[in-house]
Amino acid sequence: MPKLNVVYACQECGWSSHKWTGRCSCCGEWDSMIQEKLKPLHAQTLSGFCNEKPVSLPDVKLVNKLRMETKIDEFDRILGGGIVTGSAILIGGTPGIGKSTILLQVCQKIGQQGFVSLYITGEESTGQIKLRAERLSVTSKNIFLVAENNLHVIFEHIKDVKPKLIIIDSIQTMFNPDIGAFPGTVSQVSQITHELIYMSKKTDSSVLLAGHVTKQGVIAGPKVLEHLVDTVLYFEGEGSMSFRILRAVKNRFGSTNEIGIFEMSTNGLKEVKNPSEIFLSTRQRLNSGAAIISCIEGSRALLVEVQSLVTKSSFGVPERKVSGVDYNRVTMIIAVLRKRIGILIDGYDIFVNVVGGVKVEEPAADLGIAIAIVSSFKDKEISNETVFFGELGLGGEVRGVDQFDTRIKEVEKLGFKNVIFPKGNIADVSESKSLKMYEVSSLREAIDKTW
């Protein structure tokens, strides 16, 4: 029988079990399970709401949570208008993606408004943080730094400084000496997060937690960590790319459909006010295999370039390489082109890429991807004044998409002349003096109207 006060936790993904296994059942890593002894939470933590009595729903008093605007528009929009007082926010991302950078910049903006912030680092010294702050022009006197990872000492610092914003960089480096486990283990991360959240609710101070990620790209530690906090943000982007996308995957005080787009520079993260213009700025004119698509990210429309390269395969099995779009949808589009349009591309290598490191997940990109593949296969150039969007069905039909007006406004703003869109959206069309609009009901019809 397994011991009830012992748990075996994976050090890679945080998955836990009451019996030891050689391989983690969650992430598949070998020899990653270590034994931890469980201890009950502090009485203070467990009794946080014990004094409350059940109240009838109509008698519950509404509490208007105040928000602190960081004056970083992209960051505020993701949070739903700013940082809610007493909330806990978890920011995850790969090393070097910009987590510590955005946290320091938020401290600077908050400090300029007269609010005190306490930056607690468990990975770097205060001297290293100072060097980064000088590079980012972070000079506010309302920012206090301390290099500490003992939770008891951290609470003493919080009592002395009385900050409005607390930064923990990172949560996996913190430890509670009352728990007999190493920092970053399941029991440490769970209990520390519990106590930090309880403290933030009690003092009306907001907590921003930086979190490590695993090889699979998810935040390391127990999955309960994401359930405990109010908001979970993920940084996306390639290390070689200058663009960063901050996406909300959980938000108790706002929408989870919003994203923020930043550009990493020597002076820190800069907001990208017009991402479509940035993504299209390096586009070559009249190049086969390149099409402009309109996609929706959050509440905004983005125009991005999707490229395709179709070349004769040198091997028996042709390659299919995809970056920035769903691989399964690309293979479906290739099958539709072969079956419904009659394009014989079985013996060709096909590469599809979205320029700028953007990830397009919605099916409205199907039509543009299909046209780009046909363009590269036939070596025919696509007009650089045409934008495509529409979902592709298995029968070769082009289906309608949502947020039609938002897409069209972005197309008009950037000066494009032609739009090829699904006939199912014809009811949403309003008169436009600058755009020629071509509705299509099938992929074959879209190909005919493209050339």
Image (tube, rainbow, N blue to C red):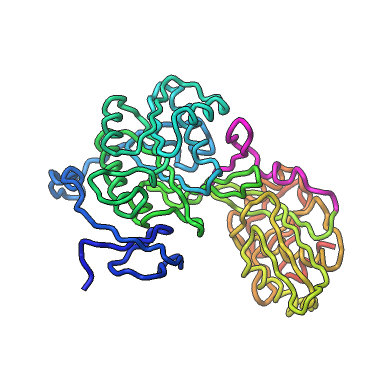
Q: Quadrant of residue 223?
A: bottom left
Q: Count all numbered tags in the image, as a single digit.
A: 0
Residue 161 percent across, percent down from the top left: 31, 25
The answer to whether 180 appears left or right of 52 in the picture is: right
Visible in this render: residue 134? yes
Task: Tell me, yes or no, if residue 448 can be seen here.
Answer: no
Reply yes or no: does residue 262 show up in magenta: yes
| Apparent side of residue 440 relative to residue 32 in the rendered image (left or right) | right
Q: Choose top left, top right, bottom left or bottom right for residue 291.
A: bottom right
Q: Can you give x and y, in whole percent of width and height, for residue 97 in the image?
A: 55, 44
Residue 75 against residue 394 in the figure, above or below: above
- Give the residue furthest to the front: 31
Along the line of sight, the residue nearer the viewer: 71 or 127: 127
Q: Which residues are magenta?
A: 258-286
387 and 116: which is toward the camera: 116
Task: Check residue 8 for magenta coloring.
Answer: no
Task: Tell whether 32 sits left or right of 319.
Answer: left
Above or below — where is 86 with respect to 287? above
Observer-nearest residue: 32 or 110?
A: 32
**235 left or right of 323?**
left
What residue occupies the far top of the structure in this picture?
141
Of the 4 image quadrants, the one containing the N terminus is bottom left
Q: Quadrant of the C terminus?
A: bottom right
Q: Please provide percent x and percent y for residue 85.
A: 34, 35
Residue plotted at (28% across, 25% down): 160
Question: Where residue 142 sits in the image (x, y, percent)?
Answer: 41, 22
Q: Residue at horizontal 24%, vertical 36%?
A: 202
Q: Is residue 160 above or below residue 394?
A: above
